[in-house]
Image: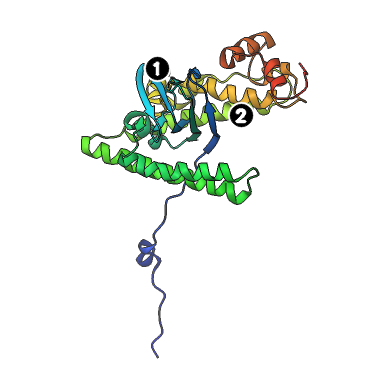
Amino acid sequence: MKELKPTPYAEWHHKVRWLPAMDWNVKFYGAHEQQVPYGWSVPAEAHIGFEINLILEGSQETTIEHNRYALNAGDILLVPAGFHHVIRCTSREGMSYFCAHFNVDEPIFRQLMVKHGQVVYPKGSNGNAALRPVVDQWLDLLRAKTVFTTEDRFHIQMLLFELFRHLVRMVMQEKEQRQETLRPPSSLHYAKAIEEALKAGVKTLAAEEGEGGTAVRVEEIAASLGITQGYASEIFRKVYGLSPRQYLSELKLHEAKVLIQQPRISLGEAAARLGYAHLSHFSRQFKRWTGMSPLQYRRQSGHSDRS
């Protein structure tokens, strides 16, 4: 019987197939159903993440970066990350809607959505038909549950990835029709590196106990990557839809809210952890962000008045 010899590694290694490795930071938050009266409005705001809004009954007027849109029952609104927008109920009988915020730090997706993404998906359109089943399932879960299990949370996130898939497919089809190209990979790499450095810097600040944290500086991040601050701001805005400083402010606001809601952490320590030398400076900035002082926010959140 002839002895079988092992196949050389080089001959079979090329037959191996791999799925891509993914390490994304994905967030889904602020999802709610609400009824509001005529004239109700949300003042101008912008978010790190995206906002999706389904009009259930009534109508609303939305202004996004000076462009005005009228939405009626069944229409879906998608506000890109970093875009300032104002929402107002325009129906005399009031309005009900479902809204959710989401985010993913995948730079190609963000670039596609900021540059090419559609804002309004009218009832009856192909885009609406693709997105509506996902939103309806979120709404069904919201109406059926008061306590959410781990399985429910995975289901919610699974639906979010389904939403991503539909959005990318629609945007890529539109992009192919226009024969447009993405930013060079180096630009995406730099934008992603800046975003990761900003998040890591703020997380480190917020986690440090005591006072005297080192401020997160965009110019230092740019220098560490070997690019100018101007170029860093330009490519970051094109991918993420807002400047690095605006993104940093949103990150600090999120961490500030988390710290303020922890009674064991004084407001002075929260300010110091976020790089503010004086509580008064932090208080003024927090009020610009939210319209209330840190102490008011802490009381509203139902925590003690430790300052």
**Which quadrant would the C terminus be assigned to in this image?**
top right
Can residue 207 be seen at all in this image of the molecule? yes
Q: Is residue 16 above or below residue 53?
A: below
The image position of residue 40, as x and y in percent, is 50, 19
Residue visible at 67% across and 8% down in the picture? 280
- Residue 144 in the figure: left or right of residue 90: right
Q: Give the mark, 1 or 2, whose residue is nearer the N terminus.
A: 2
Q: Nearer the viewer, mark 1 or mark 2?
A: 2
Residue 203: give its label: 2
Residue at (59%, 25%) from the top-left corner? 254
Between 278 and 267, the one nearer to me in the picture: 267
Q: Which residue is mark 1?
A: 230
Tag 1: residue type?
Gly
Point out residue 287 in the picture as x, y percentages from the top left corner: 61, 12
Q: Give coordinates of residue 79: x percent, y percent.
A: 42, 28
Quadrant assignment, res 86: top left
Q: Amino acid at mark 2?
A: Lys
Camera-side residue of 68 and 305: 68
Q: Position of residue 138 (x, y in %)?
A: 51, 43
Q: Nearer the viewer, residue 189 or 152?
A: 152
Q: Is residue 132 above or below residue 41?
A: below
Can residue 227 be seen?
A: no
Taking the spot 49% from the left edge, 41% from the top edge, the residue there is 24
Residue at horizontal 40 percent and vertical 91 percent from the top: 1
Report the disc number at residue 210.
none
Q: Secondary structure at mark 2?
A: helix
Q: Residues within 10 Å of mark 2 (few under 14, many from 20)?
A: some
